[in-house]
Amino acid sequence: MFYRFQYIFLFFLSLVLLISLESQKVLSFPLSQSSELRGVWLTNIDSDILFSKQKLTESISTLKQLNFNTLYPTVWNWGYTLYPSKVAKQVIGKEIDPTEALQNRDIIQEILDQGHRKGMTVIPWFEFGFMAPADSELAKRHPEWLTQRRDKSTIWLEGKVHQRVWLNPLHPEVQEFITDLVVELLNNYDIDGIQFDDHFGYPSDFGYDSLTVQLYQQEHQGKLPPTNHLDKDWIQWRADKITAYMEQLVQAIKLNNSEAVVSVSPNPQTFSLEAFLLDWHTWERMGLIEELVIQVYRSNINDYIRELQKSELQLAKTHIPVGIGILSGLKGRPVNRKNIAEQVKIARENGFAGVSFFFYESLWNIADEPLEQRRTIFKDLFPTSAIHPNIFRGWSPQASKG
């Protein structure tokens, strides 16, 4: 009897010790993996990452090894889709960008397969938005879709050299086309969201096309729009019309995938509104945005900090993940690795949800510093893994407090 009791006592004592040890193991690790946006934009401009399946595979593997967790691949550029699109085929006459290296491929599916296998978030990016090359099939086939200036001109110079035109976001057929492209992506691919930027507006000196003018007159007792394109009421009226379309688009997105993140990556509010008629602050207040990645491409640290402290950003990060877009360099405009590290540090100290870099090629391939030195920055910045701060998967404002 005694030995049986002793045996039972020792069994329960061992069980208690085992539970205690297991509890210590659990407590020695975070209760949940840390959440921080560590993103990068993948584009076909000044970059060849998308033009080789092998290079794309190697690049995503490298990003994963460096603990990046989010990919923003372009899917709409130069007036073409970068994935096989029946919608584009019907409207443009081509189902995919005609670049030879993209033929017989589906780069979005490639990125999704590789990214998701590695636990990365993939949010396709409508890089050109309502913009298109002036000589594109889209512009040639649908000149009635274009908006214009007061002098009837339609050409807008990007970078002072590239001739662009702008689709009119107030035109019902333009809205239908863009919505159909977005819905097609949602229906055909297991994407984690969709991202738009300032190109989802249009330059503020445009908007004098006949459709827009007639609509303005209907709502203003026959008056013509102000001749000053920077008139505040005229800016806000056009911005509100774009907002109305965005509201319809978000409804379509949610109807097809309620947990697809609506991400927006604009410039700071004042520039975004006055230069491109994109009132993202209103979008955010209306609940149309579920992730904001603000482009704060500033070389001066004081200017950078000033932008991070703007009230609209402080408001936004109280209820959605707000990341900071950091310029890692452009062709002919390298950014020093110390500057990159300092900006990441400041974003963290100010309680933002993370960072994303523009763009992949300038992380280390087009830089004034050796490749290994550049990669060491990110090894130091992201020494351990973290999950994408998704509002549908447990993210809360507390997670972004610095």
Image (cartoon, rainbow, N blue to C red):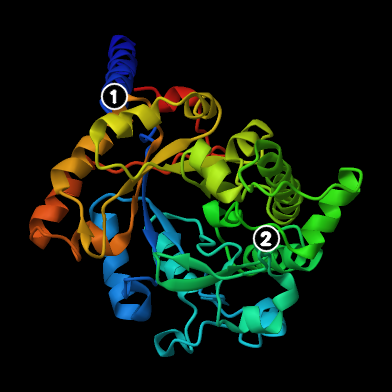
Q: Which residue is mark 1?
A: 18
* Secondary structure type for disc 2: loop
For image coordinates 57% across by 42% down, the residue present is 273
Q: Which residue is mark 2?
A: 150
Residue found at x 86% / y 50%: 217
Which SS class for mark 1? helix
- Circle nearer the N terminus (1, 2): 1
In whole angstroms, how far apart are the C-alphas of marks 1 and 2?
78 Å
Residue 366 spot, x, y in % from top left = 20, 65
Three-letter amino acid code of the residue under disc 1? Leu
Image quarter where the C terminus lies is top left
Given residues 330 and 87, the one toward you in this image is 330
Residue 17 placement: quadrant:
top left
Asked if the residues shown at circle 1 and circle 2 are in contact, with their CB atoms under 8 angstroms apart, the answer is no
**Which numbered circle lies on residue 295?**
none
Q: What residue type is disc 2 on?
A: Arg
* Left or right: residue 29 compared with residue 288: left
Visible in this render: residue 155? Answer: yes
Asked if residue 113 is positioned above or below residue 258 in the image, the reply reads: below
Kindly tell me whether residue 383 is visible in this rendering.
no
Closer-to-camera residue (367/163): 163
